[in-house]
Amino acid sequence: MTAKPQECGLISRQAIARATGLDGLLATGSRPGERFDRCIARKLHSDDIGAELSITFDDQSSLSLDELEGTKQHDRGVNLPADLGPGFTAQIEGKNGPSTYAYAWTPDTRRRLSIWITPGAPGRDHRADAIEFVRQLKPILLSTSK
């Protein structure tokens, strides 16, 4: 993710391709210079509705701490590493195959970062990929100074 941002103003095309396994991808969402709220990556020239990678930022999260903790318990989530602060990762089986996701939020739960990888590149640790996206984006989007 350290390469110059090329997609949605924040995320390198290489990082998306590595996590999703897609060489040909279409990323849509926020534009460079705009406030970031989402980035959705799909297979290029695909009619599938589902995204391979979805990154969303909610500046006014609608989920309370109790709801986030309930989701974590339901999906058997695992806390993010301690240096990343409040949040968790989980893996669930969906109608389009396995999904791995990470939620990270500010201590007051006002702002939330969500990352979904479905299904992800074969042979990769999708939890590690989701955590790395959080590691790179959290200082930009969830800074307590905002």
Image: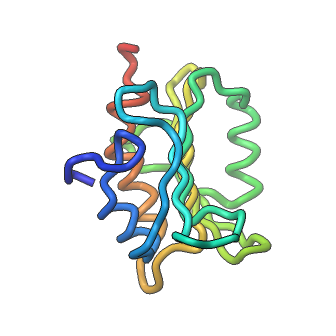
- Percent position (x, y) of residue 34? 42, 26
Is 124 located above or below residue 17 in the figure?
Answer: below
Q: Is residue 98 left or right of residue 7?
A: right
- Give me the residue at 35% from left, 41% from top: 10
- Give me the residue at 46% from left, 71% from top: 20
Is 128 located above or below residue 102 in the figure?
Answer: below
Q: Residue 75 appears in which quarter of the rendering?
A: bottom right
Q: Residue 8 appears in which quarter of the rendering?
A: top left
- The front one of 67 and 124 is 124
- Percent position (x, y) of residue 138? 39, 36
Image coloring type = rainbow
| Tally of marks | 0
Q: Residue furthest front?
A: 45
Q: Residue furthest bottom?
A: 123
- The front one of 89 and 55 is 55
Q: Residue 50 appears in which quarter of the rendering?
A: bottom right
- Give me the residue at 20% from left, 53% from top: 3
Q: Is residue 49 left or right of residue 54?
A: right
Quarter of the image for the C terminus: give it.
top left
Quarter of the image for the N terminus: give it.
bottom left
Q: Residue furthest top?
A: 145
Q: Is residue 14 left or right of residue 64?
A: left
- Percent position (x, y) of residue 78? 56, 56
- The front one of 44 and 146 is 44
Question: Visible in this render: residue 144?
Answer: yes
- The front one of 37 and 48 is 48
- Give me the residue at 41% from left, 78% from top: 124
Is 11 located above or below residue 94 in the figure?
Answer: above
Question: Visible in this render: residue 125?
Answer: no
Q: Is residue 77 left or right of residue 1?
A: right
- Percent position (x, y) of residue 74? 77, 55
